[in-house]
Amino acid sequence: MTTLAADAWPPAPIRTDRLVLRASEARDRAAFVELFASPEVGTYIGGAQPREEVERAMPEVPGQRPGLFVVERAGAMIGVVTTLDRPDPGQPEAELGYLFLPEAWGHGYAAEACAAALDWLAASLPGTSALLRTRSANEPSMRLAARLGFTEVKRYEEYGAEQWLGVREGRTGAGGVQGVAFGT
């Protein structure tokens, strides 16, 4: 896999019809705390972390790493999408991850943001396949994986629950995700 050029991060903000994907800023700290302390968000990722611990551990500017996009709607952070996490160092794929605040659920924002992030990945690292892991019981994430073009590789037991692993084969350039309908 090609590596991301040193000057390629952070990219210019990515704009969709309703969202902006951008690098993290200090003003996002409170939303990051809320995201990781939320019991609803923690349902399928091993549980919420105690707010006091999150507050104490959260840096002044959280999420400062290549491939982590803050998802902004109407000037406020509503979630994050990650694209460059590597499940195994040296592997030719990147792992897509996403977390959204509960008030952002059900509006198609995750699909819109993930599609834009996958387009960025295809343009920045052509041919890189993307992996996505989720609990198989997380029906909204399973539907999103299908809409984004991920196909099942395997199911396995981890963290006391059945997990699902899917792959989306590498693409070149930005081409959009067919079949993804964004809500309003």
Image: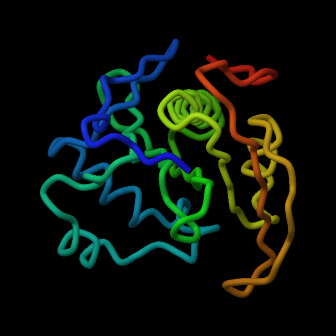
Residue at the farthest top position: 17
Residue at the farthest front position: 2
The colour scheme used here is rainbow
Query: How far across and how far down the image is residue 39, in percent?
Result: 51, 67
Residue 101 at least partly seen: no
Residue at the farthest bottom position: 160
| Corner quadrant of residue 182 | top right
| Corner quadrant of residue 54 | bottom left
- Side of 176 relative to 2 (left or right): right
Number of marks present in the image shown: 0
- Side of 149 relative to 3 (left or right): right
Say which residue appears at 47% left-offset and 32% top-offset: 124
Query: How far across and how far down the image is residue 165, in percent?
Result: 77, 63
Say which residue appears at 74% left-offset and 36% top-offset: 148
Query: How far across and how far down the image is residue 70, in percent?
Result: 37, 40
Compared to residue 56, the image places residue 81 above or below, namely: above
Work out whether residue 115 or residue 143 is closer to the camera in this orientation and state it.
Answer: 115
| Corner quadrant of residue 74 | top left
Query: How far across and how far down the image is residue 68, in percent?
Result: 39, 47
Say which residue appears at 75% left-offset and 44% top-offset: 168
- Side of 55 relative to 38 (left or right): left
Work out whether residue 32 or residue 120 is closer to the camera in this orientation and state it.
Answer: 120
Compared to residue 85, the image places residue 5 above or below, namely: above
Residue 166 at least partly seen: yes
Image quarter in which the C terminus is found: top right
Say which residue appears at 30% left-offset and 60% top-offset: 33
Compared to residue 158, the image places residue 173 above or below, namely: above
